[in-house]
Amino acid sequence: MGKIYLVGAGPGDPNLSTLRTREIILGCDVLVYDHLANPEFQKWTRPDCELIDVGKSPGRHTVPQEEIGKILVSKASTHKTIVRLKGGDPFVFGRCAEEMSVLDAAGIDYEIVPGVTAALACAAYAGIPLSHRDYGSSISFLTGHEDITKESLRVDFAKFAEIGGTLCIYMGMSKIEEIVDRLIKGGMPKEKPTAVVSNGTLPSQKHVRCNLGDLVEKAKGKCLQAPAIIFVGNAVGLSFQRSWFEDRPLFSKRIAITRSTAQSGKMKQSLTDLGAEVLELPLIEVIPSQDRKLVAEAFSGIATYEWIIFTSSNGAREFMRLFFMAYKDIRSFGPMRIACVGEATASIFRSYSLEVELVPAVSTAENLAQELVATDSLDSANVLVITGNRNRDVLVTMLETVGHAIVDVLSLYETDFADITKAKDLDSFKEFGADAIIFSSSSTALSYIEQEEDMTLSKGAQKPILCSFGPETSKTLLENDLSPDLQADEPSMDAMITAVTDKLSS
Ligand code: SAH
């Protein structure tokens, strides 16, 4: 018999899930989820994990509750770890108790993992205080309707009008007129501060703040729809200068990134922190690949090189991996000087407390070659250049012909086109499009050109602006009749993010 984990996914933003939630999803055999759990969680699962969508949305009960119970029981008889992922917290209007009863009856073991419930998260992300020493000393969680098929409201709102404090009303949008009416009939003044937050914590978050008397009109005017929380209470009326979440420069912008999955983490994080919704469309993959004999030769003669040059962080990482397979001690690195094309590559060496002697002011192979030549240290010097299979010869040619260096080239990885149809975010890209797509190298641009048909946008989808990392990438796009809408000031991640942010937030 397997074990069922009844897990709270939090309100939407996957960063609000608990460490326990992540740990369990990473290792589970089956993931049973509904529509309030962010699709991002599916990406955490193992490739062989079975995904079961039991999505419920207002008015559309795809899988009835009894059926969900049956699925859990049946999966527990064939699999070890089954996650039942629920939006927010499993115990807050989540029908968790019903599932526990089914599991009890079947004698199946379970664990419950709490999550951040929507009311708390929506309040935080819209900057709405729920309590205040002077304005609100109690907080109530209410439901507008527990079941869409039930006509009447179950909660006696007139009574809560008397109790006061801060009311957080879940599932209230379809009955918002009735709720407001009952609160006013129960004696609540029309001037009572209220707010509605829909799609809280997501890039599609919207909110409105107004008096109770204006709530219905204002919420409709701003097209606020479920899922949403209605807040009522004096503390809700405290307003602040900024909306920290919605005022971020890339808030609600969809940005597609195309570098390999292994390399996209930092960029995704930076864009997400600025408020963007990031779509991962890896167009290339980087695979370690080298000629063992050449590696052995380079390492055995390592003390003879005066310079070692890295044209990418992939090469740098792979070099250090091989280095530590060959040598135990960093001192075996010897006295050779290190040059790197950009700061990201240089930081890999600095993390080993190795000094990087040269990083060109502008991160291109040409600039690296020019600045190296200008050091006047190349004449007859042995130089080792670490590259990948797609690197251009320009650097080596310049070092040899202008700098008169003796150059050995060691290719340590291959960049291949990744099959875009395997990208989990591809469907979302095709259906809704994006505000921008970032090409971080010529190879991502070439791969896009080759696979453009598989990425064709649906009618009405947002056509993204094309963002190029640098002159080489722009050249590749232009040669293929695609004109970049912007190019980063220099080919680095920070410069690219600045350029995209300036363009999309202006
Ligand atoms: N167990 C969930 C609640 C499920 S009931 C929790 O703890 O949050 C579904 C209701 O939750 C929705 O109708 C809506 O009122 C609220 N809700 C869930 N996610 C939300 C979100 N991202 N933004 C606003 N309201 C949300």
Image (cartoon, rainbow, N blue to C red):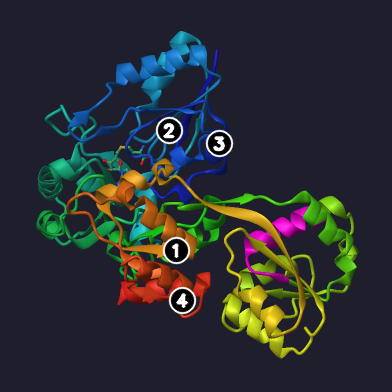
User: What residue range appears in magenta?
Assistant: 309-323
The residue positioned 56% from the left and 56% from the top of the image is 263
Instruction: Indicate which disc, 2 or 1, sits on the residue closer to the N terminus.
Output: 2
Gap between marks 1 and 4 measured at Cα: 22 Å
Q: Secondary structure at mark 3?
A: helix
State the SS at label 1: helix
Q: Of discs 2 and 1, which sits in the foreground?
A: 1
The numbered mark at residue 271 is: 1
Magenta stretch: helix, strand or loop mostly: helix
Q: Which residue is mark 3?
A: 26
Quadrant in which the C terminus appears: bottom left
Circles 2, 3 touching at the beta carbon (< 8 Å): no
Q: Earlier in the sequence, mark 2 or mark 4?
A: 2
The residue nearer to you, when weighing 429 against 481, is 481
Q: Earlier in the sequence, mark 2 or mark 3?
A: 3
Q: Is residue 287 left or right of residue 505?
A: right
Q: Which residue is mark 2?
A: 85
Q: Kindly identify the residue that appears in the image at 30 percent across and 21 percent down.
A: 65
- Mark 2: few/some/many CA within 10 Å (<14, 14-19, 20+): many
Q: Is residue 69 visible to the viewer in this orientation of the structure?
A: yes
Indicate the amino acid at tag 1. Leu
Q: Residues within 10 Å of mark 4 (few under 14, many from 20)?
A: some
Read off the residue under disc 4: 471
From the top left corner, tell me how far across and down residue 191 is, in percent.
16, 62
Question: In the rendering, which numbered label is found on residue 461?
Answer: none
Circles 2, 4 touching at the beta carbon (< 8 Å): no
| Kind of residue indicated by mark 3 | Leu
Please state which amino acid type lies under the numbered disc 4.
Pro
Amino acid type, label 2 = Leu
Between 430 and 143, the residue placed more toward the observer is: 430
